[in-house]
Amino acid sequence: MILELEQVGSVTVIRAGGSIRADDNKRFAAALRGLCAPGCRAVLDAVDLSYINSGALGEIVKFVQEVRPKGGELVVVSPRPLVNKILSAVGLLSLIKVCASVEEAVELWER
């Protein structure tokens, strides 16, 4: 798993690549927890993510449940077909917004 954090204005972009498997869950969870602040704006750039496991999906749900009541949000960008299918199968696409690009996601908060 590759994880890189980048600040784009007031938005934190988490660039994820490769596969998020069981042995990556702690690192993925720590990256999300590090962003849990009132009003946080996070983008998960999944364009290079080929697989995400159930533990990481659970961490996304926890993150959203923690930050939304405090005015925060998470947007997913360009998930590959398999990742999109996984997100859909577990109902996450009804919980989180998906955008075509990081620029589009950042613009959600710039309006």
Image (cartoon, rainbow, N blue to C red):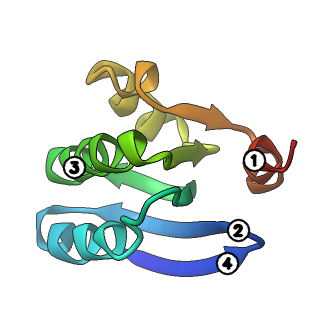
Q: Which residue is mark 4?
A: 7
Q: Which residue is mark 2?
A: 10
Question: Regarding mark 4 in the picture, which secondary structure is present there?
Answer: strand
Identified by mark 4, the residue type is Gln
Residue at 34% over, 31% down: 86
Please tell me which of labels 1 and 2 falls first in the chain: 2
Looking at the image, residue 37 sits to the left or right of residue 33; the answer is right
Q: Using the image, determine if residue 13 lies above or below residue 83.
A: below
Mark 3 vs mark 1, CA separation in Å: 29 Å
Q: Which residue is mark 1?
A: 109
Where does the image place residue 50, in percent across and percent down from the top left? 44, 54
Front residue of 93/41: it is 41
Identified by mark 2, the residue type is Ser
Question: Regarding mark 2 in the picture, which secondary structure is present there?
Answer: loop
Residue neighbourhood size for the residue with mark 1, other residues' Cα within 10 Å, grouped as few (<14), some (14–19), many (≥20): few
Q: Which residue is mark 3?
A: 53
Q: Quadrant of the C terminus?
A: top right
